[in-house]
């Protein structure tokens, strides 16, 4: 049965007794008013809804003559201004509107309505109950799959992780296709909530459920493992996924390099650099920034200069604010490099930041700054 037939079936069930017939008459009158004049009459004359209730609200929203946008406007009006009788739209009203919005392909608004259900404890219910409100009347599997996928994202966005997993379980058990992009939304939400162990656990569920895995979801899982200090498992995961045809990219390697640098594991850093070379993965600005920090911490000024020069030759800029520890060596090399190019304003800006960071410049910094002024004039 199509969604349109579902809405028609809902209307037909309300002609079984005089009360339902009366409600249908009121709903029809409200719909005609909305079509002709919009919300203004109801905003200026609240008494027009004096006999209003949830049953009438559902009939209005399911009226096929009322455009979906008008349904949505009326629904939002009811949420903002519930009458003493009807209160806010009930769960059935939300479901009816979701059906209308899906048919009209207004997916962003459909997601918003699902958000109302997810965040309102009086409306929130197990996913199987929500789906049953639709599945009892329609066999449109594509719609149900879209609904579940969207609900999964909504729960993830609102960091309702248990509820999101219940939707994931339902979709897996029902044989529905699970979108990798939706899983990424869930992984990112876990990461932002500092739920690193859950990141890896969910990634394993994705693999088990045969969700399409990309390098991006793999990198998020690896980052979660690195943040919990489980570098061996992070590296093993990368190797395992490479064996399954998922090649690590520069972001994956940067994640591991950053983790190894923070724990001062130079063997691990060298291993990642060797793998990048063998896999022919080119460095990006973040890689160079990490290497400048690494060599700077080790006091290997020559290596810092080499990396800095190579980075500049490729037209990249190191970011001292992102991922780069503020230390004398890195500031000195960067100020020296900018000074040689006559970029005195940027060199002095870094000098000011160096002072603010409580670091003491050496003679090389002052010599470079003086030289930058001379280079800028010539």
Image (tube, helix red, strand yellow):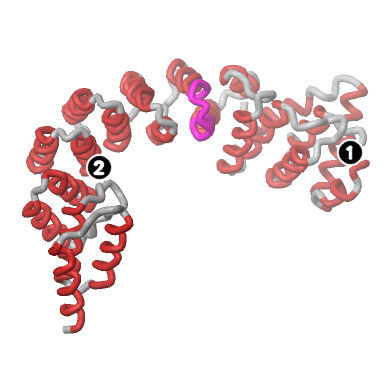
The quadrant of the image that shows the C terminus is bottom left
Report whether 303 appears left or right of 41: left
Give the percent coordinates (x, y) of residue 22: 91, 29
Q: Is residue 276 above or below residue 170?
A: below
Report whether 101 appears left or right of 148: right
Q: Secondary structure at mark 1?
A: helix
Q: Does 158 lie within the magenta span?
A: yes
Towards the viewer: 23 or 110:
110
Q: Which residue is mark 1?
A: 49
Q: Which residues are magenta?
A: 155-164
For the stretch drawn in magenta, what is the main secondary structure?
helix
Q: Quadrant of residue 131?
A: top right
The numbered mark at residue 251 is: 2
Residue at 85%, 38% (x, y): give it: 28
Q: Quadrant of residue 362?
A: bottom left
Q: Secondary structure at mark 2?
A: helix
Mark found first going from the N terminus, 1 or 2 = 1
Q: Does 257 lie within the magenta span?
A: no
């Amino acid at each position: 049965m199509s969604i349109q037939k579902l809405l028609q079936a809902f209307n037909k069930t309300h002609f079984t007794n005089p009360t339902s017939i009366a409600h249908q008459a009121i709903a029809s009158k409200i719909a005609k008013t909305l079509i002709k004049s919009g919300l203004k009459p109801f905003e200026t004359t609240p008494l027009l809804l004096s006999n209003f209730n949830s049953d009438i609200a559902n009939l209005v929203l399911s009226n096929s003559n009322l455009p979906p946008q008008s349904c949505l406007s009326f629904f939002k009006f009811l949420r903002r201004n519930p009458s003493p009788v009807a209160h806010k739209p009930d769960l059935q009203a939300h479901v009816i509107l979701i059906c209308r919005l899906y048919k009209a392909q207004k997916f962003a608004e459909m997601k918003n309505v699902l958000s109302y259900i997810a965040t309102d404890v009086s409306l929130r219910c197990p996913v199987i109950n929500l789906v049953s409100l639709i599945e009892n009347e329609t066999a449109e599997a594509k719609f149900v799959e879209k609904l579940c996928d969207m609900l999964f994202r909504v729960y993830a966005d609102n960091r309702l992780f248990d509820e999101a997993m219940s939707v994931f379980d339902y979709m897996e058990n029902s044989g529905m296709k699970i979108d990798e992009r939706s899983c990424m939304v869930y992984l990112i939400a876990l990461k932002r909530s500092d739920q690193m162990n859950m990141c890896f656990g969910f990634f394993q569920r994705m693999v088990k459920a045969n969700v399409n895995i990309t390098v991006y979801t793999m990198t998020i899982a690896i980052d979660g493992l690195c943040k919990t200090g489980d570098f061996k498992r992070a590296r093993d995961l990368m190797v395992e996924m490479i064996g399954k045809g998922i090649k690590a990219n520069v972001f994956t390697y940067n994640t591991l390099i950053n983790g190894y640098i923070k724990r001062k594991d130079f063997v691990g850093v060298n291993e990642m650099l060797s793998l990048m070379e063998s896999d022919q993965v080119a460095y990006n600005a973040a890689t160079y920034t990490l290497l400048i920090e690494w060599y700077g911490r080790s006091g290997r000024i020559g290596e810092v200069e080499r990396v800095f020069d190579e980075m500049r030759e490729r037209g990249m800029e190191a970011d001292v604010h992102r991922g780069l520890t503020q230390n004398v060596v890195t500031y000195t090399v960067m100020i020296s490099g900018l000074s040689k190019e006559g970029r005195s304003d940027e060199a002095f800006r870094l000098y000011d930041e160096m002072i603010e960071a409580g670091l003491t410049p050496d003679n090389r910094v002052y010599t470079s700054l003086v030289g930058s002024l001379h280079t800028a004039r010539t």
